[in-house]
C-alpha cells in the first residue's frame, strides 16, 4: 500500500485531524488576546475543511481493509460537516458566564474529536476501528454534556450520559466478542459471509445492535435522551440531537446493509416493531412537555423512528431517502435550536409558556421558529414535507403499508404539539413577553442559512439525484 | 455450539469453564449496574462487563483461532479505551460530588418526566 491511497480514501479524516491539532496548538499559544478569535478561527478552518471534502473520491480501502471508503460516505460526512458548522455559528453564547470563558478552546477541540470518531465509525471495515470510533464519538461527548461545571443539571446529565453510554458500549463489546468467537475474524468482509442462523450468532447480533440503538435512541433504549438533552448546554444539545444522532443512524444503516445482509429477515422484523414503538412513544411523551429542550428531545426520538422507516426497506431508494431526510432534519432542528439559543442566552427562559406573545416583540425569530416547526411536522410547501413523503414511498415500495399508515397517523398527532408552539408564539396573550432582542451576527447568519434551506431544499430536485447516484442497497 | 466443548489445544481447562467465568462476570456487572446506589460502584459494574468481553476475546483467540492474534490485540485496545472511559467518568463523578455533596444516584433526580 502506498501512502498516497491514504489521502484519497482517508482525506476527510486527515484534514480534520490537521484542524484539531492546529486548534489545540492555537489554544496553547493564543493567550488573552487570541482567545476572542477562537470562534472565527474555528469556523474559517472548518469551512475550508468542508469545501475541501465536498467532492467524492474513488471507492477504495486502506490499511488492509481496516478502512473501507465508498463515495456515499463523502455525502454523509458533508452532511455531518454542515451540521457541525451551523452549530459552531450558534455557539457564541455557550461561554456566556465568565466562568466558562477559559474553556473556549476545549469546546471546539472536543466537538471536533467526536466528529473524527464519527468519521472513523462510518468508514470502518474492521470491528476494532469501529469500536475505537464509537468510543471516540461518545467519551468526549460526555465531557461536553457536563461542560458547565457550576450547573447541577449539567453535572447530572453528564453522569447519566457517561455511565449509560459506557454500559451500552460494554454490551456492544460483549456482542463483538461473541461475533469474533463464532466467525474467527474481525473484518466486516469476512464476518458478513460467515453469519448464519446459529442462535449464538443471533444473540451476539442483538447485543451488538442494542449498543447502536442506544446511540440513535430508539425506544426501549431512549430513557437517557430527555434528561441529557435538558441538562446539557443548548449548543451541545443541538450537537447531540443532530450530528451525533444522525451519524449513529448512518452507521446503523451502513452496517445493516453491508455487514448483516444475511440477517435481513431478522433485522427487518426487529425494526418493524421498534419503529412503531419509537414513533408512538416519542409522540405521546412530546405532548406533555413544558420545557422546549425536553420537547425537542422527544420530537427527535420520534424523528429517529421516521429515519428507521427508510432503513427498513433495505433498498437503494431507502438509503437515498434516509440521507435526504437527515439533510432536511438537520436544518429544521438547527433553526429551532438557533432560536432557543438566542432567547436562552439573553433571558434564561426555556419553557414553551415563555414563548407566548413572542410574535409581538420578535417577529423575525418567531417566523424562523414557525418555519422550523412546520418543516419538522411535514407541512406541504417546506422541505420537511418532501423528505417525509420520500421516506414513506421508500417503505411503501417494499410493501410496508401498515407501517406507513401508522407513521402517517403519528404525523397527525405530531402536528398537534408542533402547532402548540406556533400557537403560543402567535395567538396567546402574555403580559410579560420576551423583550425584543438582537442576537449576534454569527447566529443570525446560521438562522438565515437554515431558513433558506427549509424553504428551498424541497424544491431542488437534483439533490436527490446526486445522492441516489452514490447510494447502494442490499 | 458443539465446538466450544472440544479442547483443541490439550490444556487442562476447557473453553466452557472460561465461558462460565465471563458470563458470570457479565451478568454480575449488569446486576450491579441496576442495583448499586453509588456512582463509583456503578462504574465498577460497567468495568466488570468490559472485562468479561476481554476474557472472551483472549479465550476465543487462544483456543479456537490460535493462528492469528486478532482477539488479543482487540483485548489490549479495549483495556486502553476502558481506561479512558473510566478517567472521564471519574472526572464527571467528582463534578457531581462537588455539586451535590455526595456521589449517590438518588441525587440525580432533578429532571423528570
Image (cartoon, coloured by chain):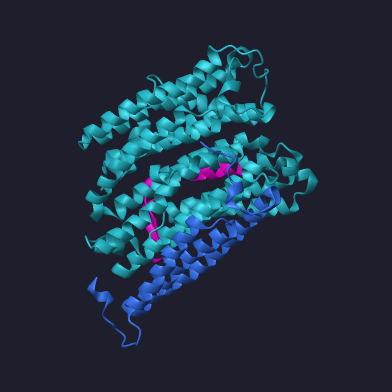
- Relative image position of residue A33 (x, y in whole percent): 79, 44
Q: Is residue A226 above or below residue A264?
A: above
Q: Residue furthest right?
A: A32
Q: Which chain is blue?
A: B
The cyan-tinted chain is: A
Which picture quadrant has residue A361? top right
Instruction: Read off the magenta span.
Output: A44-72
Is A71 contained in the magenta span?
A: yes
Position in image of residue B97 (x %, y %): 67, 53
With A132 as the anchor, is A260 left or right in this view? left
Q: Quadrant of residue A233?
A: top right
Residue A43's spot in the image, x, y percent? 61, 40
User: Is residue A350 in sight in this rendering?
Assistant: yes
Left or right: A249, with A33 as reference point: left
Query: What is the x, y in percent for residue A442?
Result: 63, 31
Q: Nearer the viewer, residue A151 or A332?
A: A151
Q: Does residue B57 appear in this view?
A: no
Amino acid at each position: 500500500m502506498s501512502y498516497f491511497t491514504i489521502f484519497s480514501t482517508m482525506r476527510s479524516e486527515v484534514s480534520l485531524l490537521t484542524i484539531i491539532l492546529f486548534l489545540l496548538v492555537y489554544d496553547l499559544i493564543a493567550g488573552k488576546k487570541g482567545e476572542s478569535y477562537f470562534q472565527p478561527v474555528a469556523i474559517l478552518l472548518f469551512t475550508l475543511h468542508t469545501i475541501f471534502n465536498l467532492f467524492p473520491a474513488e471507492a477504495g480501502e486502506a490499511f488492509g481493509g481496516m478502512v473501507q471508503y465508498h463515495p456515499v460516505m463523502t455525502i454523509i460526512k458533508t452532511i455531518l460537516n454542515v451540521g457541525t458548522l451551523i452549530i459552531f455559528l450558534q455557539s457564541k453564547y455557550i461561554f456566556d458566564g465568565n466562568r466558562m470563558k477559559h474553556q473556549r478552546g476545549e469546546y471546539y477541540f472536543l466537538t471536533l474529536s467526536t466528529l473524527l470518531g464519527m468519521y472513523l465509525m462510518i468508514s470502518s471495515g474492521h470491528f476494532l476501528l469501529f469500536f475505537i470510533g464509537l468510543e471516540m464519538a461518545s467519551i468526549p461527548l460526555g465531557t461536553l454534556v457536563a461542560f458547565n461545571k457550576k450547573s447541577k443539571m449539567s453535572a447530572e446529565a453528564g453522569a447519566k450520559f457517561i455511565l449509560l453510554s459506557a454500559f451500552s458500549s460494554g454490551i456492544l463489546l460483549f456482542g463483538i466478542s461473541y461475533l469474533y468467537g463464532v466467525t474467527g475474524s474481525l473484518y466486516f468482509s469476512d464476518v458478513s459471509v460467515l453469519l448464519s442462523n446459529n442462535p449464538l450468532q443471533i444473540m451476539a447480533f442483538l447485543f451488538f445492535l442494542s449498543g447502536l440503538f442506544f446511540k440513535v435512541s430508539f425506544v426501549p433504549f431512549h430513557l437517557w435522551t430527555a434528561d441529557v438533552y435538558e441538562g446539557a448546554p443548548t449548543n451541545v444539545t443541538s450537537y447531540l440531537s443532530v450530528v451525533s444522532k444522525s451519524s449513529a443512524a448512518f452507521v446503523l444503516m451502513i452496517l445493516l446493509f453491508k455487514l448483516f445482509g444475511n440477517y435481513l429477515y431478522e433485522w427487518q422484523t426487529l425494526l418493524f416493531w421498534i419503529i412503531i414503538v419509537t414513533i408512538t412513544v416519542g409522540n405521546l411523551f412530546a405532548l406533555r412537555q413544558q420545557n422546549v429542550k425536553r420537547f425537542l428531545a422527544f420530537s427527535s426520538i420520534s424523528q429517529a423512528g421516521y429515519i428507521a422507516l427508510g432503513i427498513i426497506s433495505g433498498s437503494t431508494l431507502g438509503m437515498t431517502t434516509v440521507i435526504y431526510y437527515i439533510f432536511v432534519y438537520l436544518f429544521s432542528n438547527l433553526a429551532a435550536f438557533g432560536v432557543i439559543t438566542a432567547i436562552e442566552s439573553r433571558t434564561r427562559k426555556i419553557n414553551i409558556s415563555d414563548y407566548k406573545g413572542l410574535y409581538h416583540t420578535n417577529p423575525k425569530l418567531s417566523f424562523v421558529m414557525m418555519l422550523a416547526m412546520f418543516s419538522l411536522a411535514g407541512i406541504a410547501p417546506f422541505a420537511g414535507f418532501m423528505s417525509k413523503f420520500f421516506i414513506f414511498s421508500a417503505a411503501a415500495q417494499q410493501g410496508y403499508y401498515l407501517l406507513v399508515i401508522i407513521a402517517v397517523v403519528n404525523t397527525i398527532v405530531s402536528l398537534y404539539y408542533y402547532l402548540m408552539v406556533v400557537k403560543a408564539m402567535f395567538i396567546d396573550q402574555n403580559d410579560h413577553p420576551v423583550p425584543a432582542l438582537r442576537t449576534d451576527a454569527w447566529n443570525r447568519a446560521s438562522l438565515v442559512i437554515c431558513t433558506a434551506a427549509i424553504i428551498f431544499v424541497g424544491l431542488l430536485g437534483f439533490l436527490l439525484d446526486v445522492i441516489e447516484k452514490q447510494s447502494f442497497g442490499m | 455450539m458443539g465446538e466450544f466443548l472440544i479442547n483443541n489445544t490439550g490444556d487442562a481447562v476447557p473453553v466452557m469453564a472460561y465461558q462460565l467465568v465471563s458470563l458470570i462476570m457479565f451478568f454480575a456487572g449488569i446486576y450491579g449496574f441496576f442495583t448499586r446506589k453509588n456512582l463509583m460502584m456503578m462504574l465498577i459494574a460497567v468495568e466488570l462487563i468490559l472485562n468479561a468481553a476481554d476474557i472472551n476475546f483472549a479465550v476465543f483467540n487462544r483456543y479456537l483461532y490460535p493462528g492469528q492474534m486478532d482477539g488479543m490485540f482487540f483485548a489490549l485496545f479495549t483495556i486502553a479505551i476502558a481506561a479512558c472511559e473510566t478517567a472521564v467518568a471519574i472526572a464527571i463523578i467528582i463534578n457531581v460530588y462537588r455539586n451535590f455533596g455526595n456521589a449517590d444516584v438518588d441525587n440525580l433526580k432533578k429532571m423528570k418526566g
